[in-house]
């Protein structure tokens, strides 16, 4: 994703808290809520996980408007912090930021947790601070163990379950990359889909080739057939993926042409009287937002 598609400048900057102006007041009940106490505990244990989001500096007043992170800022102040890492939004409109902001990715969270462990924070304390099971903390700490650099690069801006990693570790690097590309292309970074890809992976693409794959209720013959079908499906998917960009461009051009055409009242009257089915289809195309509509 290029910087032009983000709603903020990707590199955080450190800003004094007294130079941040809240865009709204935090309700008193939230300042005493369980959520706020969890934020306090998390920051105290591992530091600020997600940067605050602010507008560009107002040169007249010398302050930034705080767009997102009011509870985090309040927690930082309570803990005695004097500054905070912040992402600078490109657009001052809060609704634009909220629609476009990218939250902390799973790999970024992994690095944050690893840094906390290196500073001496125990897994038990991390689990309590982040309000998650200690076993899940262990998975997050070992998230990238056995995952090749290329697959990590593909996943670095994504959010996915830590349970995905143990599945990928069973695959050789080349197959890891193939599976991650398929999951991203289909926007399906789920454990069941990863398990299906693992089941359909030829034995020679597994880390432990000598151990036959076993799935309850599936015979060896059915497994071989599923491998062939998945390989064929992957090939077809990649062919479709290659033409997807051109198909989207054609849709945009067609929508633009038909939208202008339907602005002509004479055309509307003619189609309504003689080809109402064409008019309905043309209208549907102009309202479409994707190739699946």
Image: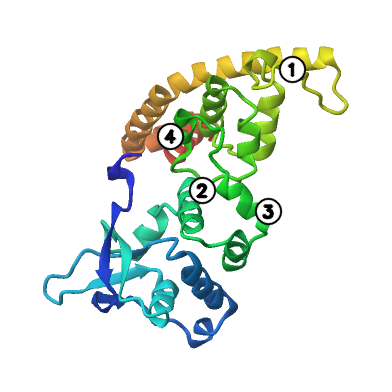
> Which mark, by number, is residue 139?
none
Which residue corresponds to mark 1?
A: 226
Q: Which quadrant is the N terminus positioned in?
A: top left
Q: CA distance from mark 2 to mark 3?
A: 16 Å
User: Where residue 283 appears, x then y in whole percent?
Assistant: 45, 38
Helix, strand or loop status at disc 4: helix
Residue 272 shows up from this direction: no
Nearest to the eye among marks 4 and 3: give it: 3
Q: CA distance from mark 3 to mark 1?
A: 33 Å
The first of marks 1 and 4 along the sequence is 4
Dot 2 alpha-carbon crowd within 10 angstroms: few under 14, some 14 to 19, many 20 or more: some
Nearest to the eye among marks 2 and 1: give it: 2
The first of marks 3 and 1 along the sequence is 3
Helix, strand or loop status at disc 2: helix
Q: Residue at x 56, y 73 (%)?
A: 38
Q: Nearer the viewer, residue 220 or 248?
A: 220
Which residue corresponds to mark 4?
A: 153
Which residue corresponds to mark 2?
A: 106
Which residue corresponds to mark 3?
A: 135
Dot 1 alpha-carbon crowd within 10 angstroms: few under 14, some 14 to 19, many 20 or more: some
Label 2 close to label 1 by CB (< 8 Å): no
User: Where residue 245 appears, x then y in whole percent?
Assistant: 40, 25
The first of marks 4 and 3 along the sequence is 3
């Amino acid at each position: 994703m290029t910087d032009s598609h983000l709603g903020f400048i990707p590199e955080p900057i450190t800003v004094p808290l007294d130079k941040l102006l809240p865009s709204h007041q935090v309700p008193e009940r939230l300042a005493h809520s369980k959520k706020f106490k969890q934020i306090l505990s998390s920051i105290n244990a591992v530091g600020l996980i997600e940067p605050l989001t602010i507008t560009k500096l107002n040169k007249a007043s010398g302050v930034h408007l705080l767009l997102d992170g009011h509870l985090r800022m309040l927690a930082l102040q309570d803990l005695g912090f004097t500054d905070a890492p912040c992402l600078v939004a490109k657009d001052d409109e809060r609704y634009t930021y909220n629609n476009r902001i990218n939250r902390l990715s799973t790999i970024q969270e992994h690095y944050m947790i690893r840094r906390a462990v290196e500073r001496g924070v125990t897994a038990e304390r991390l689990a309590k601070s982040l309000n998650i099971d200690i076993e899940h903390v262990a998975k997050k700490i070992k998230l990238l163990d056995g995952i090749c650099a290329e697959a990590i690069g593909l996943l670095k801006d994504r959010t996915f379950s830590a349970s995905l990693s143990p599945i990928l570790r069973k695959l050789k690097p080349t197959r890891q990359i193939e599976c991650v590309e398929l999951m991203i292309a289909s926007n399906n970074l789920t454990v069941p889909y990863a398990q299906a890809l693992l089941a359909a992976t030829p034995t020679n693409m597994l880390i432990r080739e000598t151990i036959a794959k076993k799935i309850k209720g599936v015979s060896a013959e059915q497994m071989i057939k599923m491998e062939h079908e998945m390989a064929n499906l992957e090939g077809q998917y990649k062919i479709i993926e290659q033409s997807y960009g051109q198909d989207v461009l054609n849709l945009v051009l067609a929508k633009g042409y038909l939208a202008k055409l339907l602005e002509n009242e004479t055309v509307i009257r003619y189609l309504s009287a003689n080809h109402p089915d064409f008019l309905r289809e043309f209208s549907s195309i102009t309202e479409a937002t994707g190739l699946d509509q």
